Amino acid sequence: MLKVIYTETGQYLEHTSSTLQCWMICQHRLANQVGDRLSVEHCTASILLPADTRVITMLESITMNEVSRPFIWEYADLHTIEVVFSGLWVSPDANGHEGTVLVEVGDRIAVELFHLWADAAKQMSTISQ
């Protein structure tokens, strides 16, 4: 499973081997114990990746053998690819801007997408320094 996390400081991606059901049960229990609400609704989330040959080859290889497509990708511009996921938005506030999008994908796909995203984040931090 992938978690696309939105905070005040940015967007983050995490891979977890936990199932969606297990993660949601834990979050509901935690929210109940501390007296918080938990809003859950269907949504889409996206991440941006560099449009280089390695990324394109990896995305094509990930999606080639998949019967049900866990995500779609397209060129955002000449230098960027947008990867769009369908998932569940989980947040303490239904109208809030902070929360987590849970995307149910296989472990292999989650790990590969996470590494592509982490490599892109490293490149961006190197450029901005």
Image (cartoon, rainbow, N blue to C red):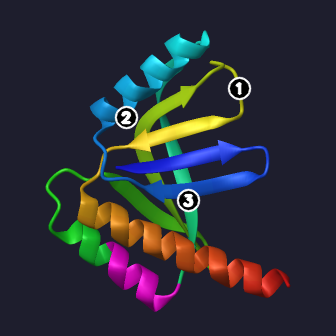
Which numbered disc, 2 or 3, marks the residue closer to the eye?
A: 2
Q: Which of marks 3 and 1 is nearer the N terminus?
A: 3
Q: In this view, does 18 lie above or below 61?
A: above
Q: Earlier in the sequence, mark 1 or mark 2?
A: 2
Q: Mark 2: which amino acid?
A: Trp
For marks 2 and 3, give the CA distance. Answer: 22 Å
Instruction: From the image, tell me which residue sits under label 3.
Output: 47
Q: Mark 3: which amino acid?
A: Ile
Q: Which residue lies furthest to the bottom in this view?
A: 53
Q: Residue at x 41, y 38 (%)?
A: 87
The reply to whether residue 50 is visible in this rendering is: no
Q: In this view, does 55 lie above or below 74?
A: below
Q: Which residue is drawn at 66% across and 53% down?
A: 11
Please report the bounds of the magenta region as a residue range.
Answer: 52-59
Instruction: From the image, tell me which residue sits under label 2.
Output: 23
The mark tally for this picture is 3
Q: In this view, does 100 lie to the left or right of 102?
A: right
Circle 2 SS class: helix
* Residue 9: image location, x then y, percent: 78, 51
For marks 1 and 2, give the CA distance. Answer: 20 Å
Callout 2 touching callout 3 (CB < 8 Å): no
Q: Residue furthest right?
A: 129
Instruction: From the image, tell me which residue sits under label 1.
Output: 96
Q: Is residue 109 above or below residue 18?
A: below
Q: Which of 57 and 121 is in front in this view?
A: 121
Magenta portion: prevailing SS class: helix
The reply to whether residue 14 is visible in this rendering is: yes
Give yes or no for residue 58 being in the magenta stretch: yes
* Residue 6: image location, x then y, percent: 65, 44
Q: Residue at x 78, y 86 (%)?
A: 127
For marks 3 and 1, give the CA distance. Answer: 19 Å
